[in-house]
Image (cartoon, rainbow, N blue to C red):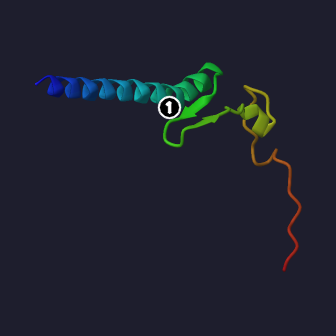
Amino acid sequence: MQQTFNRLRLIFLTLFVLGVAASAVYQVLWLKPERACLARGNWWSARSRTCAVPIDITAITGRPRGAPAPTPAAAPSRPALPAR
């Protein structure tokens, strides 16, 4: 009878230690990168587990904020492509 209790005690202690280790690994490898990314003000993608830096639209378009959209007549003309 004593041997059975000792075996059960060892089994439960092992399961407890494995559970604590799994929880620590989950924190370090899964939650910590997401929290660090969000703390820096970046965007976190849970699907691909990547941290992306947002880009301001003015850096792409070159127009200041609040400027009206260019009309087709005001758009610069492009040179024609040579025929093949």
Q: Nearer the viewer, residue 41 or 19?
A: 19
Q: Which residue occupies 53% across, 43% down?
A: 48
Q: Quadrant of the C terminus?
A: bottom right
Circle 1 sits in a helix, a strand or a loop, which is it? helix
Q: Which residue occupies 64% across, 22% down?
A: 41
Q: Which residue occupies 61% across, 19% down?
A: 39
Position of residue 58 measured from the top left corner of the image (x, y, whole percent): 76, 32
Q: Which residue occupies 54% across, 25% down?
A: 32
Position of residue 14 measured from the top left corner of the image (x, y, whole percent): 32, 28
The quarter of the picture where residue 15 lies is: top left
Q: Residues within 10 Å of mark 1 (few under 14, many from 20)?
A: few
Position of residue 16 measured from the top left corner of the image (x, y, whole percent): 32, 24
Q: Nearer the viewer, residue 77 or 23?
A: 23
As drawn, the residue found furthest toward the top would be 39
Q: Which residue is mark 1?
A: 30
Q: Quadrant of the N terminus?
A: top left
User: On the picture, is 16 further left or further right than 68?
Assistant: left
User: On the picture, is 7 further left or further right than 47?
Assistant: left
